[in-house]
Amino acid sequence: MHSWNLSPAEAIALQKELRTHLILSDQLGIVRRVAGVDVGFETGGMITRAAVAVLCYPELDVLETAIARRPTEFPYIPGLLSFRELPAVLDALEQLHELPDLLLCDGQGIAHPRRFGIASHLGLLVDIPSIGVAKTRLCGTHDTLPDPRGAWTPLRANHEIIGAVLRTRPGVKPLYLSPGHRISLETAITYVMACCTRYRLPETTRHAHRLASEPQ
DNA sequence: GCGACAG
DNA sequence: ATCTTGTCGC
């Protein structure tokens, strides 16, 4: 149902056009439903499996989940991840009976070479506030991060702040988060911390990841 | 030209 | 991401 079949060069051109429509200020209502989005692969990469887990906020109990499978049709190219994973994610989102108020995606938001990572791409396409929550850095530089939970330092690139490096657990590798669409960096940090209760990753992401990579 | 490089 | 077992540490 969703596929773009674009060349890498066309995908880059599309990112440059779409990024001009991003809103990087808070444009969210009361958040009652937060969704975690993640993708896994089956058959050695032949099949892409996307999973969405919707949790109530701030309680963080699972309300609804969805899984979608599609043949994988775009290679993994740093900077073009959304073209590989979003077709399946969009299929999964359409299965939900009620759309979430906020999306937490595995990967970058605007902390991306063209300021248009997968979280930004998804948020813009479905017009839902989104945050990119990555386990590692794609681009940008930052100072050393203090150890206490909640500590954060800006992620910078070309004199601009593109995200934050956030310590969600003491003594554990930090998270790289950035606004996707319709949310500010400060608000994004607040929501991500609120979703990280006992582990490094947000509860939303943990549920989605389990659904996306669990056997069967 | 030489690295870096989300998942 | 995925291929894969045990192992170090709280």
Image (spheres, coloured by chain):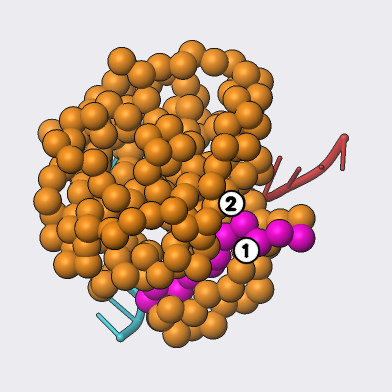
Chain colours: A orange, B red, C cyan
Instruction: Name the quadrant containing residue A160.
Output: bottom right
Q: Is residue A138 visible?
A: no
Quarter containing the C terminus of chain A: top left
Which residue range is magenta in the image? A159-174
Q: Residues within 10 Å of mark 1 (few under 14, many from 20)?
A: many
Q: Which residue is mark 2?
A: A111
Instruction: Name the quadrant containing residue A73.
Output: top left
Residue drawn at (40%, 38%) of the image: A127
Q: Residues within 10 Å of mark 2 (few under 14, many from 20)?
A: many
Position of residue A140 relative to residue A96, above or below, is: below
User: Contact, CB < 8 Å: mark 2 with mark 1?
Assistant: yes
Q: If you read the primary sequence from the N terminus, does the residue marked by circle 2 or circle 1 appear first?
A: 2
Position of residue A89 relative to residue A153, above or below, is: above
Q: Which residue is mark 1?
A: A155
Position of residue A193 relative to residue A46, above or below, is: below
Secondary structure type for disc 1: strand
Position of residue A29 relative to residue A215, above or below, is: below
Q: Is residue A165 magenta?
A: yes
